Image (cartoon, grey):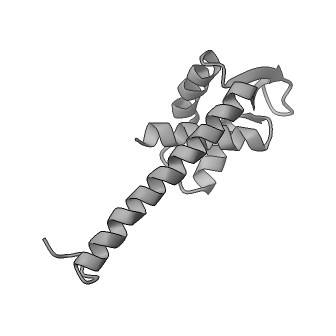
């Protein structure tokens, strides 16, 4: 489940601005995703590129070799929109279950 969520998060980060892999790892870290390194992100980006959601461009770097910057394609923007709709639906459904469980158990979530 987390894989699909990370895909959507990456698309949202890329939508903000053209961005390179290490920068995406830092962004994910800043949002609390601590277990995602560049090594985890690059295979996802390559798959998203094969699927036509992102494109990449090599650009000069002020420190070291050229960097591959990613940007969304129109297909990627549609995929992000669909992800957001699926996420909102899932969030609503899960919240409904949790709220009903809390009401049914009188707020005591330790009951079995």
Residue 73 visible to an observer of this rendering: no
Residue positioned 60% across, 21% down in the render: 46
In what quadrant of the picture does the C terminus appear? Answer: bottom left
Q: Name the foreground residue: 105 vs 52.
A: 105
Q: Eyeballing the image, is 102 above or below 50?
A: below
Residue 101 visible to an observer of this rendering: yes
Q: From the viewer's perspective, is 39 left or right of 72?
A: left
Q: Name the foreground residue: 73 vs 14.
A: 73
Q: From the viewer's perspective, is 14 left or right of 48?
A: right
Q: Name the foreground residue: 53 vs 35.
A: 53
Residue positioned 24% across, 76% down in the render: 104
Quadrant of the rendered structure where residue 76 is? top right
Q: Name the foreground residue: 32 vs 89.
A: 89
Q: List x then y, in percent, for residue 38.
A: 58, 34
In what quadrant of the picture does the N terminus appear? Answer: top left
Q: List x then y, in percent, for residue 102.
A: 30, 76
Residue positioned 52% across, 44% down in the render: 86
Quadrant of the rendered structure where residue 25 is? top right
Q: From the viewer's perspective, is 108 left or right of 92?
A: left
Question: Could you tell me how many numbered marks the image carries?
Answer: 0
Q: Eyeballing the image, is 87 above or below 41?
A: below
* Residue sitting at the far left: 112
Q: List x then y, in percent, for residue 63.
A: 81, 33
Q: List x then y, in percent, for residue 83.
A: 57, 41
Quadrant of the rendered structure where residue 19 is? top right
* Residue sitting at the far top: 50
């Amino acid at each position: 489940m987390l894989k699909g969520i990370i895909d959507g998060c990456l698309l949202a980060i890329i939508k903000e601005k053209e961005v390179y892999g290490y920068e995406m790892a830092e962004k994910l870290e800043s949002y609390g995703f601590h277990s995602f390194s560049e090594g985890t992100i690059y295979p996802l980006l390559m798959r998203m590129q094969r699927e036509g959601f992102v494109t990449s461009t090599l650009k000069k770097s002020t420190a070291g070799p050229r960097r591959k910057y990613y940007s969304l394609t129109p297909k990627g923007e549609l995929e992000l929109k669909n992800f957001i709709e699926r996420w909102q639906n899932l969030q609503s459904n899960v919240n409904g279950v949790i709220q009903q469980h809390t009401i049914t158990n009188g707020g005591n979530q330790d009951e079995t």
